[in-house]
Amino acid sequence: MKRLLVKYSSEITLKGLNRRIFEDALIRNIKVSIGKEHTIEKESGRMFIYTASSDLAQKLVKVFGIISVAEAEVVEKEIQDISRAAIEQLKSIVNVRTFKVETKRADKRFPIASMDVSRLVGGEILKNIEGIKVDVHKPDIIVNVEIRDKGYVYTKEYKGVGGLPYKSSGKGILLLSGGIDSPVAGYMLARRGMELTAVYYHSHPYTSERAKEKVIDLAKKLAEYTGSMKLYVVPFTRIQMEIMEKCREDELTIIMRRFMMSIAQEIACRENALALVTGESLGQVASQTLESMYVTNSDITMPVFRPLIGMDKVDIMDVSRKIGTYDTSILPYEDCCTVFVPKHPKTKPKLKDIKNSEQKLSVEELIKEAADGAEIILL
């Protein structure tokens, strides 16, 4: 008999009285990923799924909270049966010259200690497979043995994304552009359990439908990890035109960012979200200087999370490639931030000056109009 053996984050097992809440959230997310028809059992830091499908394993490794998924052979708790399963698995793998046996004895009533199980199983492997050797430092393959209600033997293990179960840490609004940074920021907060609703600012006809589709595709990529995603497409053209007509050109970027944050906060209130999430990295562009971010935040009353704040672009790009958003992010379709860019934007804006400029605008009316006119897409 085979099962998928799911190892989940040690952070969950250390939650004390709240542990069950996090485990139940993880089980719900697993069922969203693979379907409700699969039986799931949990036992001391492990979950067992009654199937051995590699396809399901590949889905599970994208579920936040899971650190690995193994395809385990389930046998009786006898050294002969455990050794036989280990030998069969090693024989099915090509070009294995060295191995190591690692044993975890979760059932302390089992009379043989972990080290002795590894020694006995390793001895049987050496007797039955020619040309193979033990290497405890850098083996070609590790044979894992877990002693629980049964014996679990596996050599094939897939690494998961870890973190905390999605929707276990409140809800936030992700300001999602078509660039590299914001999808990475969303991924990082979702990995810490935050439920995300995304907001994208669309400047029709200055930004094309292809630009909008690009952002939808990025939201779909994130939904591969979260299970679902709600995306608000906010009409932003009128706001940008008003700013261009009535405010100084060098203040365009910072006033535009202030509107974006205020609209996101308005949507957050409607969505019962408690924080905003952006992909800003300190000093990366004019709108991401410390002075600019201070002015941007000044009218926002809820927390603003910037998980990339201390990362450089190379690090962010590496994560983007890892999570599968990079190739979509670099597609050459413009967004509202790249179309309306002043030649010499202010890098050290003064809050008093920006507020004086905004007096020429119907700020509250424009914010409400944009939020009311948003298109909602469920992914």
Image: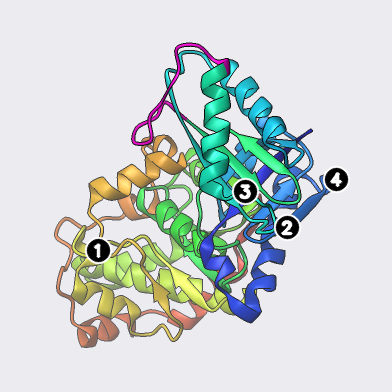
Q: Amino acid at mark 4?
A: Glu
Numbered label attached to residue 42: 2
Inter-mark Cα distance, 3 to 1: 49 Å
Per the image, label 2 sits on a secondary structure element best described as strand
| Residue wearing tag 3 | 112
Q: Which class describes the residues within 10 Å of circle 1: few (<14), some (14-19), or many (20+)? A: few
As drawn, 238 above or below 131? below
Question: Is 270 contained in the magenta span?
Answer: no
| Residue wearing tag 4 | 37
Q: Main secondary structure of the magenta part?
A: loop
Viewer can see residue 305: yes
- The tag earlier along the polypeptide, 2 or 4, is 4
As drawn, 362 above or below 196? below
- The tag earlier along the polypeptide, 2 or 1, is 2
Inter-mark Cα distance, 3 to 4: 37 Å
| Foreground residue among 184 and 378 | 184
The image shows residue 163 at horizontal and vertical percentages of 50, 59
